[in-house]
Amino acid sequence: MIAATRRLGEVLKDMPKPKGKRTDLVASCNQVGNPTLEDLGILKNQSARAQKLFALPEKIIRQYVIEQTKAAGERRKPLAN
């Protein structure tokens, strides 16, 4: 899931930003042919989170995954009789 979210952040970072004002009634997709987040079914907070995750160094992501994996393993250990 983290890898997919980071990849989404990479793609969104490179997407052209919509032109015009927020008050424009015509979607930017219709004006310049580029899809908006709404057209893609992505919420603004999802976009922001994915781009922030993409901006983190790979080393930090790797360490986080290792820590989460260890923590999940400790929670699943059966009780000793």
Image (cartoon, rainbow, N blue to C red):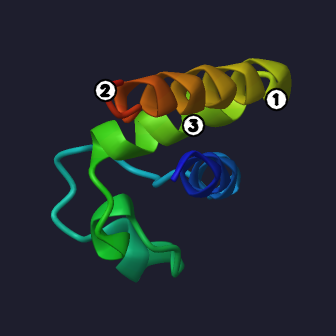
Question: Residue tagged by mark 1?
Answer: 58
Name the side, left or right, on which 21 lies relative to 61.
left
Q: Are marks 3 and 1 in contact (CB under 8 Å)?
A: no
Q: Earlier in the sequence, mark 3 or mark 1?
A: 3
Secondary-structure class at tag 2: loop
CA gap, disc 2 and disc 1? 35 Å
Who is closer to the viewer here, 9 or 27? 9
The quadrant in which the C terminus is found is top left
Question: Residue tagged by mark 2?
Answer: 79
Which residue appears at 46% of the width and 54% of the height?
18
Secondary-structure class at tag 3: helix
Q: Position of residue 41 (x, y in %)?
A: 29, 69
Quadrant of the image occupied by residue 25: bottom left
Amino acid type for the residue under numbered disc 2: Leu
Secondary-structure class at tag 1: helix
Nearer the camera: disc 3 or disc 1 = 1
Q: Residues within 10 Å of mark 1 (few under 14, many from 20)?
A: few
Question: Residue tagged by mark 3?
Answer: 51
